[in-house]
Image (tube, rainbow, N blue to C red):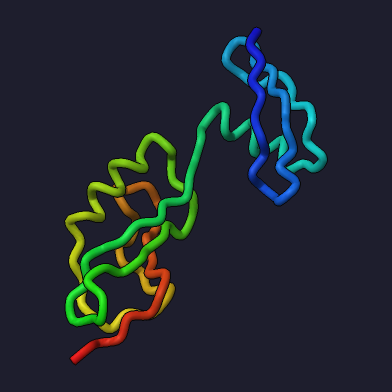
């Protein structure tokens, strides 16, 4: 049996939770004040996921880089692979917030989208 202490990040309360793991599975979660904490703890132990925020090269804009974000969470162990992939992406203006920049990155079922507008410059 193993015990882990973690803070929930699902809301501003930041509950400190105690997670008990037995035989590789979550046996109990204590300290959360809502069901989201329980789900977060179980997911974090069994299959941690994270949002990805990064930039891609953009031509024809006022700035050389366009901020992008994953449309959903990605497996934590694949975040670096996705970031490396995004370094190779070059797009052109104009771009609107929410435009899909990379569809289904690395076959993970998650799109990478623009997180700001970038009009053509010049």
Left or right of residue 114, residue 46 in this image = right
Q: Would you identify the image quadrant in which residue 53 lies?
A: bottom left
Quarter of the figure with residue 16: top right
Q: Residue 97 location in percent, x, y? A: 42, 76
Query: At 75% across and 46% down in the image, what residue appears?
Result: 13
Residue at x-position 32% and y-position 80%: 118
Q: Nearer the viewer, residue 7 or 88?
A: 7
Residue lying at the far bottom of the rendered structure: 122
x%, y% of residue 109? 40, 51
- Number of residue marks: 0
Q: Is residue 105 left or right of residue 97?
A: left
Identity of the residue furthest to the front in this view: 63
Residue 91, quarter of the rendered image: bottom left
Q: Residue furthest top?
A: 1
- Give above or below for 61 relative to 44: below
Looking at the image, is 58 positioned above or below residue 5?
A: below
The quadrant of the picture occupied by the C terminus is: bottom left
> Hey, which residue is sitting farthest right in the picture?
33
Tell me the quarter of the image containing the N terminus: top right
Q: Taking 72 as reference, is 1 left or right?
A: right
Depicted 15 relative to depicted 92: above or below: above
Which residue occupies the foreground of this view, 64 or 36?
64
Give me the residue at 64% from left, 20% from top. Answer: 4
**Residue located at (67% from left, 39% from top):** 8
Provide residue 15's location: percent of width, then percent of height. 74, 38
């Amino acid at each position: 049996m193993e015990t882990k202490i973690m803070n929930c990040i699902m809301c501003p309360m930041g509950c400190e939770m105690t997670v008990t793991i037995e035989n590789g599975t979550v046996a109990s979660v204590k300290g959360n004040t809502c069901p989201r904490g329980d789900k977060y703890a179980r997911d974090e132990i069994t299959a941690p996921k994270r949002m990805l925020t990064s930039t891609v090269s953009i031509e024809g804009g006022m700035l050389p880089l366009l901020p992008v974000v994953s449309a959903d969470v990605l497996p934590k162990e694949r975040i670096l692979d996705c970031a490396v992939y995004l370094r190779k992406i070059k797009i052109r203006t104009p771009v609107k917030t929410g435009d899909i920049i990379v569809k289904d990155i690395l076959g993970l079922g998650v799109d990478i989208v623009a997180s700001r507008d970038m009009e053509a410059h010049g």
